[in-house]
């Protein structure tokens, strides 16, 4: 079910915006449909490769547009609730991906939670490490270029919230 929760939240946000009279461009609708298709492909393949990366690109594009439009027509409190829902969906996705990729991570204490983060254009490795440090988390670079971020569960949630806010800003 990876990425499905995020996709569903974005679909619900788009429906709410349409009810408020916001016209969603065809490109955004196409990206949302493409994300759904790629989610199904990645689940069928059982792979986490290119299909998963394309899903994240599509969802990121849709999320950026919808949040920007939501800030124009919805109250700040309502936008914050949508951001929390997106964060929860992203945490769920990260947890599912982590469970699929590896059930055991060496070097992470048992009482701590972890997520793997893949640096992207507007969130390079250095910025992710800085956000992790600000959130009182530890970071271990992985061989595949991703970062293993770990620490207390509430710190992980704060870190993901900061990452989401930063990704939406840019």
Image (cartoon, rainbow, N blue to C red):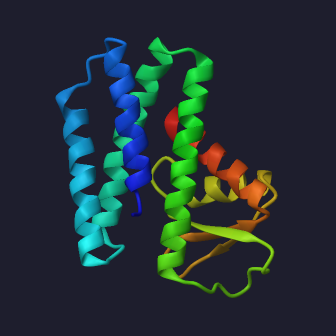
Q: Is residue 126 left or right of residue 41?
A: right
- Judging depth in this view, the residue of 163 and 8 nearest the camera is 8
Q: Residue at x 21, y 56 (%)?
A: 37
Q: Is residue 105 visible?
A: yes
Count of numbered labels shown in the rendering: 0
Q: Position of residue 135 (x, y in %)?
A: 77, 53
Q: Residue at x 50, y 15 (%)?
A: 74
Estimate the x, y position of residue 16 in percent, counting from the top left. Answer: 39, 23
Q: Image point 53% across, 32% down: which residue?
A: 82
Q: Quadrant of residue 107?
A: bottom right
Which image quadrant for residue 47?
A: bottom left
Is any part of residue 124 visible from this angle?
Answer: no
Does residue 35 sit above or below 80 in this rendering?
below
Rendered residue at 32%/56% (across/down): 55
Figure quadrant of the N terminus: bottom left
Q: Between 8 and 148, which is closer to the camera in this rendering? A: 8
Is 135 placed above or below 50 here? above
Q: Is residue 102 left or right of residue 135?
A: left
């Amino acid at each position: 079910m990876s990425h499905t929760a995020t996709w569903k939240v974005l679909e619900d946000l788009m429906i709410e915006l349409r009810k408020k009279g916001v016209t969603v461009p065809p490109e955004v609708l196409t990206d949302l449909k493409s994300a759904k298709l790629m989610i199904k492909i990645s689940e069928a393949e059982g792979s986490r490769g290119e299909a998963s990366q394309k899903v994240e690109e599509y969802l990121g594009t849709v999320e950026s547009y919808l949040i920007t439009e939501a800030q124009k027509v919805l109250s700040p409190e309502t936008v914050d609730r949508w951001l929390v829902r997106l964060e929860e969906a992203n945490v769920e996705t990260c947890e599912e991906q982590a469970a699929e990729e590896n059930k055991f991570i060496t070097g992470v204490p048992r009482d701590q939670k972890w997520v793997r983060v893949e640096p992207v254009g507007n969130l390079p490795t250095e910025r992710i490490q800085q956000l992790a440090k600000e959130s009182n988390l530890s970071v271990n670079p992985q061989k595949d270029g991703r970062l293993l971020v770990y620490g207390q569960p509430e710190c992980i949630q704060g870190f993901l919230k900061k990452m989401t806010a930063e990704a939406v800003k840019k």
